C-alpha cells in the first residue's frame, strides 16, 4: 500500500548504536498521523531520515512514492524540533521574505492575517529576538504552513505553549486537516492525539509497539486512555515484575 509517507523496514544506527531496528508504516492522504514515543525513542530521527537529512542504515523512506526532493512539486512544510529564526529582523520582514520564497501572492497580507489569527496582532514590527519563545514559535509555525504544503511534518508543534495557545494551535491544525492537508505530528500530549489524530504509531525499542487507528490502539489495550497506554508501554521496564 502506498501512502503520502511510506516507511519500509527502516533501520538506523549511530556509531554502532541501533536506534531504529525495523520500522514500517504508511501515512495516508488527508490524515493526521501521530508519531509517538518516549524521549529518545527515535521519532525525530525517523523524520530526519524521511526528509533525507539522515542517511538510513537500511530500508526505504518515501514521500509520495519517491525519495524526498526539496525542489520537487510535492511541497512539504517542516517544523523541526530545534527552533530558530533570524533574531534582529522584524517579524513582518522575515515572514514576507519566506512568503516570497514560497511563492505566496501577497506574502505581507498573508502574514498579517496569520498574526491576527494567532493572537499576535501587534508584533509585525517587533524584532523577533525580543519576543518570547512561544511567540517566536508561532511565527515559525506560520512560516511552516505558508504556501499550502501537501504534507506538514510538525515535530512537537505545541512544545512550551500554555493551554490557551495549545488549543489555538490545535484549531489551526484541524483547519488545515479539513482543507485536505496530510499531517504527521510528533507530540507528548496525549489529549492532542485523542482530539486530532486519525491514526498513530507508538515507537518503542526501535520498532512499532502499537500502530493503527486510535480506536484500535485503545481496544488493543483494553480501552485504556492514551495517557494510561503511554505510561504502561514506556513504564514497563521500571514496573517489570
Ligand atoms: N546525529 C546523531 N548522532 C548520534 N546519535 C543520535 C543522532 N541523532 C539522534 N541520535 C540518537 O538517537 C536516539 C533517538 O533520538 P531522537 O532525537 O530521534 O529521539 P526522539 O524520539 O525525537 O526524542 P524526544 O522526544 O526527546 O525529542 C537518541 O539516543 C539520540 O541520542
Ligand atoms: Mg525529538
Image: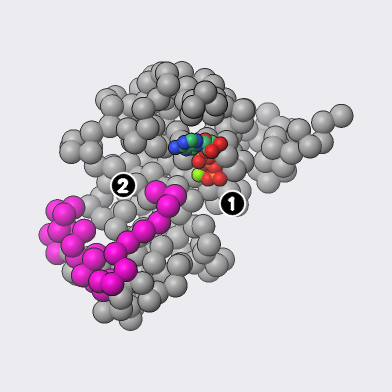
**Residue at mark 2:** 77
3D distance between C-alphas at marks 2 and 1: 21 Å
Indicate the position of residue 143 as horizontal and vertical percent values.
Answer: 29, 58
Image coordinates for residue 168, horizontal then vertical, percent? 46, 64
- Circle 1: is it few (<14), some (14-19), or many (20+) Cα within 10 Å? some
Q: Residue at x 45, y 33 (%)?
A: 46
Look at the image and say whether residue 85 sits in the magenta stretch: yes
Q: Is residue 37 above or below residue 93?
A: above
The answer to whether residue 237 is above or below residue 107 is above
Instruction: Report if the beta carbon of the residue with label 2 is closer than 8 angstroms to ligand 2.
Output: no
Badge 2 or badge 1: first in the primary sequence: 2
In magenta, the rendered stretch is 80-106
Local crowd size for mark 2, using a 10 Å CA cut-off: few (<14), some (14–19), many (≥20): many
- Is 225 left or right of 33, judged from the image as shown? right
Q: How many marks?
A: 2
Tell me where residue 109 sits by quadrant: bottom left
Q: Nearer the viewer, residue 162 or 176?
A: 162
Is 191 situated left or right of 2 in this image? right
Q: Residue at x 40, y 74 (%)?
A: 131
**Quadrant (top left, top right, bottom left, bottom right) of the N terminus:** top left
Residue tagged 1? 189
Instruction: Look at the numbered disc 2 and give the secondary structure of its residue.
Output: strand
Q: As displayed, is residue 226 above or below residue 69? A: below
Q: Camera-side residue: 149 or 98?
A: 98
Report the residue at 41% width, 18% height from top.
59
In the figure, residue 97 lies in which quadrant? Answer: bottom left
Amino acid at each position: 500500500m502506498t501512502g503520502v509517507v511510506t516507511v519500509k523496514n527502516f533501520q538506523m544506527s549511530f556509531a554502532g548504536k541501533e536506534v531504529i531496528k525495523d520500522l514500517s508504516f504508511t501515512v495516508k492522504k488527508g490524515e493526521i498521523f501521530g508519531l509517538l514515543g518516549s524521549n529518545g525513542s527515535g521519532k525525530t530521527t525517523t523524520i530526519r531520515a524521511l526528509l533525507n537529512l539522515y542517511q538510513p542504515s537500511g530500508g526505504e523512506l518515501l514521500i509520495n512514492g519517491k525519495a524526498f526532493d526539496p525542489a520537487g512539486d510535492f511541497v512539504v512544510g517542516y517544523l523541526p524540533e530545534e527552533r530558530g529564526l533570524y533574531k534582529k529582523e522584524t517579524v513582518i520582514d522575515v515572514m514576507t521574505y519566506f512568503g516570497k520564497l514560497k511563492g505566496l501572492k501577497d506574502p505581507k497580507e498573508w502574514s498579517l492575517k496569520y498574526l491576527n489569527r494567532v493572537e499576535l496582532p501587534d508584533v509585525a514590527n517587533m524584532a523577533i529576538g525580543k519576543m518570547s519563545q512561544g511567540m517566536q514559535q508561532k511565527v515559525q509555525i506560520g512560516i511552516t504552513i505558508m504556501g499550502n504544503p501537501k504534507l506538514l511534518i510538525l515535530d512537537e508543534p505545541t512544545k512550551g505553549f500554555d493551554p490557551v495557545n495549545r488549543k489555538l494551535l490545535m484549531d489551526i491544525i484541524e483547519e488545515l486537516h479539513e482543507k485536505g492537508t496530510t499531517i504527521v505530528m510528533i507530540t507528548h500530549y496525549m489529549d492532542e492525539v485523542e482530539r486530532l489524530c486519525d491514526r498513530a504509531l507508538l515507537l518503542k525499542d526501535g520498532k512499532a509497539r502499537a500502530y493503527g487507528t486510535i480506536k484500535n490502539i485503545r481496544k488493543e489495550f483494553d480501552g485504556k486512555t492514551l495517557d494510561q497506554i503511554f505510561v504502561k508501554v514506556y513504564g514497563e521496564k521500571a514496573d517489570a515484575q
